[in-house]
Image: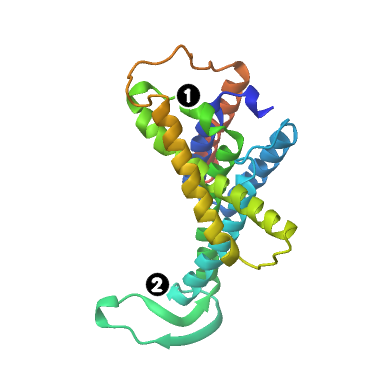
Amino acid sequence: MNKAFHPLTWWTGAIAIAVAVSLAHHTAFNLVVVGGICLLVYKVNQGAIDKTPWSGGLWFALKIAAIIIVIRTIIGIAIGVPIPGSTLFELPIADLPDWMAGIRIGGAITQERLTFALAEGIQIATLICIFAAATSLTSPHRLLRQMPIFIYEFGVALVIATSVLPQLVTSASRIKNAQKMRGIERKGWAGVALPLLEESLARSLDLAAAMDSRGYGFSRQRSRYRRERFLARDLTIIFSALTLIPFSMVAFA
């Protein structure tokens, strides 16, 4: 199902939704967006014939987003600029040098300060989930084929950046399953880090040898492959995402 859409459809929609989220800066709107993209990714991946390494990128990003919300909230509570309001509880105040005037560690924790820190964490987590959803729904190989020749090197870097995390997650899961089959029980990432590093280096060397054997970088002319065209369903998704921008400007102005 996800192969029926143009590779740039989901990324264009993700950029539009990210702009809308940044303009709205509203916690309820952010939660609705995250819920919507999670449902979309689930439906699209459910209809896919085969599972790709990047199809589970959103679910891993949700874990990272939850950690970011917790860290941002703790930092916002413990360290920051005092915000007046309804005091919930107080923490011991640490002495800071004069050049850090205006910043306080500890002190009175107000409801407004806690709400602001939580809202900031949700805002950052929402942006992460938006682009993780685009990564989950788009094949990086098909995305690279759509890049114009004059920004092809940028496209290569972009594809590597968006696909390395899903590849690492897949490799780590495969290594853990192999260790369990051999009766090796290791908790955490300590027993996975070294095999994962070795596999990543071996894969990089194989990729470099494959690119060198095919003459990559010697020709600046495009092959007979032609870029895919945007269809009506692609334009529908893109325009639907673009309508969120004026909606967020009017509804949350």
Q: Earlier in the sequence, mark 2 or mark 1?
A: 2
Residue 198 lies left or right of residue 82; in this view the side is right
Q: In which quarter of the view is residue 56 placed?
A: top right
Name the kind of residue labelled 2 in the image. Answer: Val
Q: Quadrant of the N terminus?
A: top right
Decide: is 222 above or below 8: above
Residue 237 position within the rendered picture, expressed as x and y whole percent measured from the top left: 60, 27
Residue 162 position within the rendered picture, expressed as x and y whole percent measured from the top left: 49, 41
Decide: is 11 above or below 172: above
> Residue beneath label 2, please?
81
Residue at 69% from the left image edge and 54% from the top image edge: 178
Residue at 33% from the left image edge and 75% from the top image edge: 102
Residue 142 position within the rendered picture, expressed as x and y whole percent measured from the top left: 53, 27
Q: Residues within 10 Å of mark 1 (few under 14, many from 20)?
A: some
- 2 vs 1, front mark: 1
Residue 147 position within the rendered picture, expressed as x and y whole percent measured from the top left: 42, 25
**Residue 203 is at least partly visible in this image:** yes
Q: Which mark is residue 145?
A: 1
Name the kind of residue labelled 1 in the image. Answer: Arg
Q: Which residue is situated farthest in the top direction here?
A: 224
Residue at 57% from the left image edge and 46% from the top image edge: 166
Q: Residues within 10 Å of mark 2 (few under 14, many from 20)?
A: some
Q: Closest to the observer: 238 or 90? A: 238
For label 2, the SS is loop
